[in-house]
Image: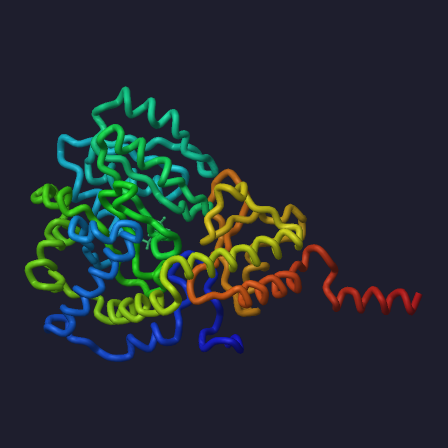
Amino acid sequence: MNQLSDNPYLLLTPGPLSTSPTVRQAMMKDWCTWDDEYNALVQSIRSRLVDLALPEHPECFDQYTSVLMQGSGSASVESVIGSVIPTDGKLLVLANGHYGQRIGQMAGVLNIDSYVWDFGESGAIDLPELDAFLAVHQEFTHVAVVHCETTTGRLNPLERIAPIVKRHQCEFIVDAMSSFGGVRIDVASLGIDYLISSANKCIQGVPGFGFIIANKTKLAACEGVARSVSLDLFGQWQGMEQGNGKWRFTSPTHTVRAFDQALSELAQEGGVAARHQRYSNNHYVLVEGMRALGFETLLEDEAQSPFITTFFNPSHSDYDFKRFYTRLKEAGFVIYPGKVSDADCFRIGNIGHVFPEDMARLISAIEQNCYWNAPSSEQKQLEHKQLETA
Ligand SMILES: *Cc1c(COP(=O)(O)O)cnc(C)c1O
């Protein structure tokens, strides 16, 4: 156990992530899923999520709704993709990483007419090209993009993508899984029609469900569109509306309780602005420290989110990621392997119940475990002895 927490190690991954002891404590009871008290809690969560999505336009509250959906984050993404694009619609996916590609894969399996525009795993979305493309290809009805592409940590600029999507009258779908709650996003100003995130990312809950913030007018037009029963977004919405917070199927009650606590803790911290500041501080300590140790980041600073960072693996022949990973885990930190196919790298997340002091401790642990740079102390002693005997 690491001495600063009741957990065996700190998760420095993009979710599931380290949660507070009080969030975990909220799961220690068995809760009823059908009664009024529970339903009221669900309704309160739904309305707090809409509040979080409208920092600049609270007056638009009645135009948006939120729907909670069982499963991992991908289930919520799949629920949107499968429920909102009609048979005569066409989806454009702007992809620069694994999660964008996954949206394209979902559309493919669901037989949805789609095109995945691949900007490369470490590439930026070309905005003038996008504008020109949509002007010519008017058959596209929906555009999907990942906000923070967790593959690399790149933050795609929603404020520049949104006006292009809206200019061409497309509905806008945003996978904000690893960013929502950790950075200000105003769905009304951006004209986002469907924003997807999950319990176990920046809101700092535990895994078990995701949620969708939806434009009510758009969602209301989706009756009968879904290609799945359990992932029918319209159906889930109607179920929650008519049942005042009732889930259609067994809800992840413990996770929902923990999420309620996590939302309260987000408010106590000072809301999204304060959380963003903490994550930015974490990120700063991480990147400065890593650079001082000779590590290099994959992305240029301007494109980098404050949530997860990709570092190149050292090129030293004695370096081995698995060994590095295991040593850090023993020291109390779990880092994350890389996912970029054309670059040799690993990732470190800094979201969750994690603070700048933790990042500073991580940096010293890394410094002590750069075994490939310096001979180990035993080796040094051995060499010393050899010198003495010589
Ligand atoms: C975490 C994440 C998801 C969802 O992943 P699950 O493993 O299904 O929870 C989707 N998109 C992005 C960008 C993510 O970071």
Q: Residue at x 51, y 38 (%)?
A: 342
Q: Could you tell me residue 65's position as x and y percent? A: 18, 53
Q: Between 331 and 266, which is closer to the camera in this rendering?
A: 266
Q: Between 371 and 83, which is closer to the camera in this rendering?
A: 83
Q: Residue at x 48, y 76 (%)?
A: 5
Q: Quadrant of the C terminus?
A: bottom right
Residue 384 sits in quarter: bottom right
Q: Could you tell me residue 86's position as x and y percent? A: 14, 36
Q: Which residue lies most toward the right here? A: 390
Q: Residue at x 53, y 64 (%)?
A: 356
Q: Could you tell me residue 171's position as x and y percent? A: 22, 37
Q: In the figure, is residue 373 to the left or right of 111? A: right
Tell me how the rendering is colored: rainbow
Q: Which residue lies most toward the front here? A: 59
Q: Which residue lies most toward the bottom here? A: 29
The correct choice, above or below, for 41 with respect to 75 in the image is: below
Residue 258 sits in quarter: bottom left
How many numbered marks appear?
Answer: 0
Q: In the figure, is residue 188 to the left or right of 285? A: left
Residue 207 visible, this orientation: yes
Q: Which residue lies most toward the top here? A: 136
Residue 327 visible, this orientation: no
The correct choice, above or below, for 271 with respect to 155 in the image is: below
Q: Residue at x 21, y 25 (%)?
A: 139
The correct choice, above or below, for 116 with respect to 245 in the image is: above
Residue 331 sits in quarter: bottom right
Q: Could you tell me residue 343's position as x and y percent? A: 53, 41
Q: In the figure, is residue 272 to the left or right of 211? A: right
